[in-house]
Image: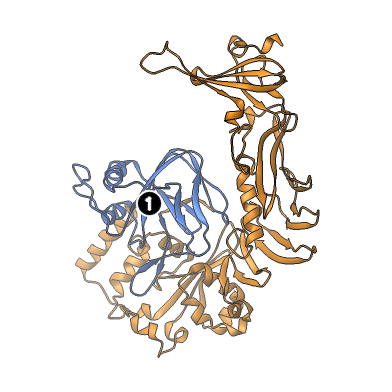
Chain colours: A orange, B blue
């Protein structure tokens, strides 16, 4: 095998990686870059291989006899004297000294373009699923990643993941199902151990936070016991955990991704007080509870009036006293600065991505849904829109409508003129 | 004034005339964010608004944020006065000064991906009305 002797790689302007293949234990050479030998794999029986990574230290030289590496030399050039060489020689047996469970990396690749044309390009032995040891492999075909597999030491397959499957299953060493995810699992090949960690974590605790398995909006996770009976279950809708998530006796209840109490989860629409729900601080929880109540029931139960609507978005208003009870503690905190503050205004806005309705409180002075959207985004719309400026001048808080003196009229006109010069908020994109 | 909205987060590109003020605030805000790509974290859902790809750097201005030197004409600039000049009212919670050197994509598990062109931005969470003050929208 004259071609593989020292110097070949650099003579051909190629870079390379040398490694031992899994079971055959035969020295192989994989060329990564360079014209002629790009992404090709060769077996080497006898010879020397020099691995030169763009001329950077350390250069490594391998001596191979009968397909086995017998000696490794790391060659470094000291910074002070680049022509000098520091050669570290070690026998292969010495460098192989590692723990039983140690991770042995064949080679990791950062991009698709660098994958070998065929075969396993990443292999880790001694990993575990539960208490069962096995080997993880990532395999390429035609220089593309095609699958990741985990084999138990008894030869049974724990899982195979391919980028195009609609589901993902993990089996026990006895061949019985262990876990099933009914969604395309997002590509894990770059961070293969993340997938394994995810498997381990999910098997350990589905009721915890290890639930994001896929970029798909809707999917399910099922766990099975040693007899193959389902004992764990969780469901994702619209990227959010919903319903009952259970693993054995552990149970958690979710509404729109938020963990809630069992009582709240099973509460019927009639059991919830819309007034109380509107006071909920977290908008996501408020939206989830409102979803349960339903917009029609809200309008039926509370005297809200739709002041303005724009598609699915609405601006609702009601008298605050009709929403909150007089003896309510929160009423004491309310600073009634003008008559309009005795009203409560809710902007009901539909999320363009999820289609969910959010109920957000806005100043009661606002008259249009679009103004409410702008106010929520930080625009003090009352200082920008002419109608609010006029209202402020002509209807002060402590009195009804009044006539303005000529000087006041002039001041109001100036303010309106200044406001018109201000740039309005324009949404480029919403998601 | 243009704006990008991603769930409860609002990103406003800084206009040309306020770039120097933004830069002063950015430099004087002190420590840069450890993970500038995460501009907001979900408080109970755990879902983040995260910038993917491109080149991003960011710093946070808290409500009691330090004053910045400002330009020769503007004098000292505080977070409040800068936002006011930008046309933004009182904002509760942190304001992120975001520098996108190369276009990135804003992602969140529940929302569609939003391409963010290169530029300087002010990012903050939507506010909500409260009788006593405006409060931050949290999910």
Residue that carries the numbered disc 1 in the rendered image: B96
Residue toward you, A395 or B97:
B97
Q: Position of residue A51 (x, y in %)?
A: 57, 19
| B83 left or right of A317 in image | left
Q: Position of residue A289 (x, y in %)?
A: 56, 74
Q: Position of residue A38 (x, y in %)?
A: 66, 19
Picture quadrant where residue A224 is located: bottom right
Q: Could you tell me which secondary element the residue under label 1 belongs to?
A: strand
* Quarter of the picture holding the N terminus of chain A: top right
Picture quadrant where residue A136 is located: top right
Which residue, as the protein is rendered here, is positioned at the far bottom? A327
| Depicted A328 relative to depicted A203: above or below | below
Residue toward you, A239 or A358:
A239
- Residue B30 appearing in the image: yes
- Residue A313 appearing in the image: no
Mark count: 1
| Depicted B21 relative to depicted A380: above or below | above
- Which residue is found at the position 60% from the left and 9% from the top? A11
Judge the density around disc 1: few (<14), some (14-19), many (≥20) Cα neighbours within 10 Å. many
| Depicted A347 relative to depicted A378: above or below | below
| Depicted A387 relative to depicted A181: above or below | below
Residue toward you, A84 or A390:
A84
- Which residue is found at the position 59% from the left and 66% from the top? A256
Circle 1 chain: B
Residue toward you, A130 or A242:
A130
Q: Position of residue A159 (x, y in %)?
A: 74, 48
């Amino acid at each position: 095998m004259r071609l593989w002797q020292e110097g070949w790689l650099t003579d051909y302007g190629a870079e390379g990686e040398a490694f031992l293949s899994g079971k055959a234990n035969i020295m192989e050479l994989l060329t990564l870059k360079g014209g002629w030998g790009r992404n090709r794999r060769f077996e080497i029986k006898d010879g020397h291989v020099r691995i030169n990574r763009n001329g950077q230290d350390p250069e490594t030289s391998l001596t191979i006899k009968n397909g086995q590496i017998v000696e490794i030399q790391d060659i470094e050039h000291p910074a002070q004297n680049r022509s000098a060489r520091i050669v570290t020689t070690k026998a292969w047996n010495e460098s192989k000294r590692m723990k039983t469970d140690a991770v042995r990396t064949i080679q990791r690749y950062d991009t698709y373009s660098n994958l070998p044309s065929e075969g396993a390009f990443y292999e880790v032995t001694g990993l575990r699923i539960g208490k069962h040891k096995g080997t993880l492999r990532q395999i390429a075909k035609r220089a593309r990643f095609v699958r990741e597999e985990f084999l138990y030491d008894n030869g049974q397959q724990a899982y195979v993941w391919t980028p195009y499957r609609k589901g993902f299953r993990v089996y026990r060493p006895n061949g019985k199902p262990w876990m099933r995810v009914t969604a395309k699992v997002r590509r894990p090949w770059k961070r293969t151990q993340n997938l394994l960690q995810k498997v381990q974590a999910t098997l350990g605790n589905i009721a915890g936070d290890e639930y994001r398995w896929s970029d798909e909006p809707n999917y399910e996770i099922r766990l099975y016991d040693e007899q193959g009976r389902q004992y764990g279950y969780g469901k994702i809708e619209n990227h959010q955990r919903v319903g009952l998530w259970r693993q054995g006796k552990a149970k958690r209840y979710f509404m729109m991704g938020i963990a809630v109490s069992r009582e709240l989860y099973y509460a019927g629409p009639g059991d919830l007080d819309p007034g109380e729900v509107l006071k909920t601080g977290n908008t996501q929880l408020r939206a989830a509870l409102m979803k349960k109540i339903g917009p029609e029931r809200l309008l039926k139960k509370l005297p809200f009036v739709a002041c303005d609507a724009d598609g699915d978005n609405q601006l609702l208003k009601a008298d605050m006293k009709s929403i909150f009870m007089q003896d309510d503690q929160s009423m004491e905190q309310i600073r009634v600065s003008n008559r309009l503050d005795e009203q409560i205004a809710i902007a009901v806005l539909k999320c363009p991505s999820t289609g969910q309705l959010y109920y957000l409180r806005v100043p009661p002075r606002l008259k249009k849904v679009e103004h409410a959207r702008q106010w929520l985004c930080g625009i003090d719309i009352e200082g920008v829109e002419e109608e609010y400026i006029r209202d402020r001048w002509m209807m002060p808080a402590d009195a009804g409508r009044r006539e303005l003196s000529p000087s006041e009229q002039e001041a109001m006109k100036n303010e309106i003129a200044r406001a018109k010069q201000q740039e309005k908020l324009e949404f480029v994109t919403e998601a | 004034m243009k704006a990008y909205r991603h769930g409860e987060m609002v990103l406003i590109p800084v206009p040309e005339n306020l770039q120097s003020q933004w830069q002063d605030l950015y430099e004087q805000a002190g420590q840069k964010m450890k993970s500038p790509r995460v501009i907001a974290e979900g408080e109970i859902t755990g879902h983040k608004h995260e910038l993917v790809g491109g080149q991003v750097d960011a710093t946070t201005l808290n409500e009691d944020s330090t004053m910045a030197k400002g330009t020769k004409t503007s004098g000292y600039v505080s977070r409040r006065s800068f936002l006011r000049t930008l046309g933004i009212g009182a904002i509760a919670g942190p304001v992120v000064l975001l520098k996108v050197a190369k276009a990135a994509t804003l992602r969140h598990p529940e929302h569609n991906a939003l391409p963010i062109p290169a530029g300087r931005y002010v990012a903050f969470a939507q506010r909500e009305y409260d009788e006593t003050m405006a409060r931050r929208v949290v999910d």
